[in-house]
Image: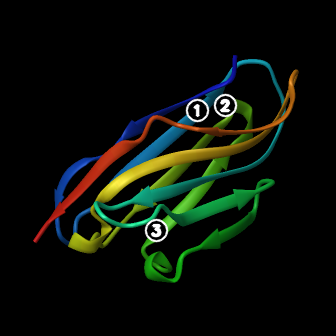
C-alpha cells in the first residue's frame, strides 16, 4: 500500500521560516510528480508548488520567491522550504504525488499538516 507521510509544520511568527517534508512509501515504480497543496478555513484547496521529474517546478504566484520545492529521488521525498511567511499562508498543507505503482497510476494525498503564521 502506497502512503505519503508528512512532517514539519507548526506555529511561526510572520517573517519566519518553516520546512515541510513528505516521503512516499510502498511499492513505487516511478514518481511522476510531487507537490504541496494547502487549504485555509472556508477556502478551496489550492496548489502551492509542484515538482515534475527532478528539476521542473511550478509555484503559485502568491509564494513565488518565498517558497522552494525540492525533491530527493533516492528517498522518495519532497521538501517545501517556506521563508518570509505571512499570516495568509496559514492553512493545512497537503502533500500530493502522482505515482506509478503495482496497481497502475495513482494519485495519493498525505494526511495534512497545519501551518499557522501569527501576525
The Cα atoms of the two marked residues, 3 and 2, are separated by 21 Å
Q: Position of residue 92 (x, y in %)?
A: 35, 51
Question: Crowding at label 2, few (<14), some or many (≥20) Cα neighbours within 10 Å?
Answer: few
Q: Which residue is farthest left?
A: 119
Nearer the observer, 94 or 72: 94
Q: Quadrant of the N terminus?
A: top right
Residue under the point 48% across and 41% down: 21
Residue 86 visible to the viewer:
no
Disc 2 is placed on an element classified as helix
Residue 51 visible to the viewer:
yes
Residue under the point 57% across and 64% down: 49
Q: Position of residue 12 (x, y in %)?
A: 18, 57
Residue indicated by mark 1? 23
Q: Does residue 97 sit above or below 117 in this rendering?
A: above
Q: Does residue 71 sit above or below 110 in this rendering?
A: below
In primary-sequence order, the first of circles 2 and 1 is: 1
Nearer the observer, 108 or 26: 108
Residue indicated by mark 3? 67
Discs 2, 1 touching: Cβ within 8 Å: yes
The Cα atoms of the two marked residues, 1 and 3, are separated by 19 Å
Disc 1 is placed on an element classified as strand
Determine which of the numbered discs, if any, sits on residue 91 in the image: none
Q: Is residue 49 left or right of residue 91?
A: right
Residue under the point 43% across and 46% down: 20
Q: Is residue 25 left or right of residue 12?
A: right
Q: Position of residue 78 (x, y in %)?
A: 59, 45
Disc 3 is placed on an element classified as strand
In primary-sequence order, the first of circles 3 and 2 is: 3
Residue indicated by mark 2? 75
Q: Does residue 26 sit above or below 95 in this rendering?
A: above
Amino acid at each position: 500500500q502506497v502512503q505519503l507521510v508528512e512532517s514539519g509544520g507548526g506555529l511561526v511568527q510572520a517573517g519566519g521560516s518553516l520546512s515541510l517534508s513528505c516521503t512516499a512509501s510502498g511499492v513505487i515504480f516511478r514518481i511522476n510528480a510531487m507537490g504541496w497543496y494547502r487549504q485555509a478555513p472556508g477556502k478551496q484547496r489550492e496548489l502551492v508548488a509542484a515538482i515534475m521529474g527532478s528539476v521542473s517546478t511550478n509555484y503559485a504566484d502568491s509564494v513565488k520567491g518565498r517558497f522552494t520545492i525540492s525533491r530527493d529521488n533516492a528517498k522518495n521525498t519532497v521538501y517545501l522550504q517556506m521563508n518570509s511567511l505571512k499570516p495568509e499562508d496559514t492553512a493545512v498543507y497537503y502533500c500530493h504525488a502522482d505515482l506509478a505503482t503495482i496497481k497502475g497510476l495513482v494519485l495519493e494525498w498525505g494526511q495534512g499538516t497545519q501551518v499557522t503564521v501569527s501576525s
